Image: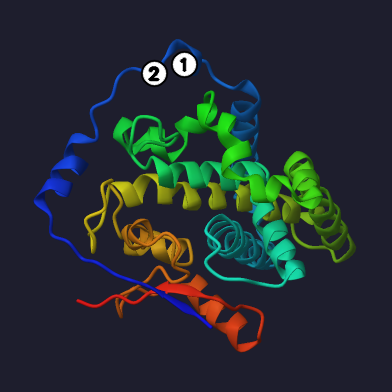
């Protein structure tokens, strides 16, 4: 049986003022000012490789198809698997399906599932407060991507925030070796491109399927931390800067209805008004019809 989360819609002036004051910040402590060169180098390499994918010599319809399919798999893995299923337990799915969805999300190379989930849960506890690791009060670019290039103090609390995943050896393994998932993708794309004489060859397909896909998924999902804490409208007076942003919602399969999500984090449905299209929610409804999703939690919005 599905469950309904009670809704509220306050016009509290006090909470709006809190959202305005939230942007005042002290400088980062010295320990956080140094770059993490491993992460910084990886991001730089991926962005350079992604730019090569757009050269005419690597352009092909097969490359576009590979990009589209892997983009759908990866983004859905993040939104449906890592986010709504595992981070918030918005619904219950069979163990085998949960693992598949988490693997799909881990293809995004946004760290392993334990780190991803613990940081997301930390964000909800301290959204737009000084100890929020991608605190929007420090500016658009900090919340978009700069935060991850520095030390992340919130990771010290992973054992408290993601204990349910830490207890599972499968998630522990995936958290350490998530980068290895790109190897079978690399080999498959290279083999197919060379065997079938695709324009740009196997390297062309690899460039479209790995670095270009990763960079696109990076920026699209990072927009949830930055753009939806900057642009858009609010249905609910949450004590943070969360907004509903339609174009981010389109790119992220519904994650752009961020103010709704911050008002009701456990809701499997993020698009609450008739025009707030939520593609991930449509996938959850499909899983429900197939008997693969139950105990679905959702907030029923009423104006």
Q: Position of residue 55 (x, y in %)?
A: 62, 48
Horizontally, residue 44 falls left or right of residue 209, namely left
Q: Secondary structure at mark 2?
A: loop
Q: Which residue extends farthest left?
A: 13
**Is residue 18 positioned above or below 32 on the image?**
below
Q: Secondary structure at mark 1?
A: loop
Residue 197, visible in the rendered structure: yes
Question: Residue drawn at (61%, 45%), measured in percent from left and top?
Answer: 162
Q: Which residue is mark 1?
A: 33
Question: Do tag 1 and tag 2 residues touch (Cβ < 8 Å)?
Answer: yes
Residue 52, visible in the rendered structure: no
Question: Residue drawn at (33%, 71%), measured in percent from left and top?
Answer: 6
Q: Which residue extends farthest bottom?
A: 289
Query: N-terminal of the two: label 1 or label 2?
Result: 2
Relative depth, front residue between 250 and 235: 235
Relative depth, front residue between 159 and 33: 159
Q: Position of residue 151 (x, y in %)?
A: 54, 23
Relative depth, front residue between 87 and 233: 87
Quadrant, the C terminus: bottom left
Q: Which residue is mark 2?
A: 28
Write down the quadrant of residue 81 in the picture: bottom right
Q: Residues within 10 Å of mark 2 (few under 14, many from 20)?
A: few
Question: Residue drawn at (29%, 70%), measured in percent from left and top?
Answer: 7
- Mark pair 1, 2: CA separation: 7 Å
Question: Residue drawn at (76%, 51%), measured in percent from left and top?
Answer: 168
Q: Residues within 10 Å of mark 1 (few under 14, many from 20)?
A: few
Relative depth, front residue between 113 and 267: 267
């Amino acid at each position: 049986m599905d469950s309904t989360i009670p809704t509220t819609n306050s016009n509290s002036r006090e909470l709006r003022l809190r959202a305005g004051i939230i942007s005042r910040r002290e400088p980062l402590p010295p320990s956080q000012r140094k770059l993490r060169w491993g992460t910084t180098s990886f991001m730089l390499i991926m962005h350079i490789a992604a730019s090569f994918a757009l050269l005419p010599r690597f352009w092909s319809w097969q490359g576009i198809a590979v990009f589209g399919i892997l983009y759908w798999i990866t983004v859905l893995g993040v939104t449906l698997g890592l986010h709504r299923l595992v981070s918030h337990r918005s619904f219950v799915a069979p163990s085998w399906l949960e693992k598949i969805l988490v693997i799909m999300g881990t293809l995004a190379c946004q760290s392993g599932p334990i780190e991803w989930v613990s940081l997301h849960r930390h964000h909800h506890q301290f959204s737009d407060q000084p100890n929020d690791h991608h605190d929007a009060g420090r500016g658009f670019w900090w919340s978009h991507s700069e935060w991850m290039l520095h030390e992340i103090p919130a990771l010290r609390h992973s054992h408290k925030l993601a204990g349910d995943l830490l207890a599972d050896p499968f998630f522990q393994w995936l958290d350490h070796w998530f980068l290895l998932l790109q190897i079978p993708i690399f080999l498959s794309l290279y083999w197919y491109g060379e065997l079938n004489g695709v324009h740009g060859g196997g390297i062309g397909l690899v460039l479209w399927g790995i670095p270009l896909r990763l960079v696109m998924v990076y920026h699209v999902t990072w927009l949830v931390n930055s753009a939806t804490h900057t642009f858009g409208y609010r249905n609910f007076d949450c004590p943070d800067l969360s907004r509903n942003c339609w174009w981010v919602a389109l790119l992220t399969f519904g994650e752009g209805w961020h103010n709704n999500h911050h008002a009701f984090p456990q809701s499997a449905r993020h698009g609450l008004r008739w025009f707030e299209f939520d593609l991930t929610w449509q996938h959850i409804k499909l899983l429900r019809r197939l008997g693969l999703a139950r105990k679905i939690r959702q907030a029923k919005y009423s104006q």
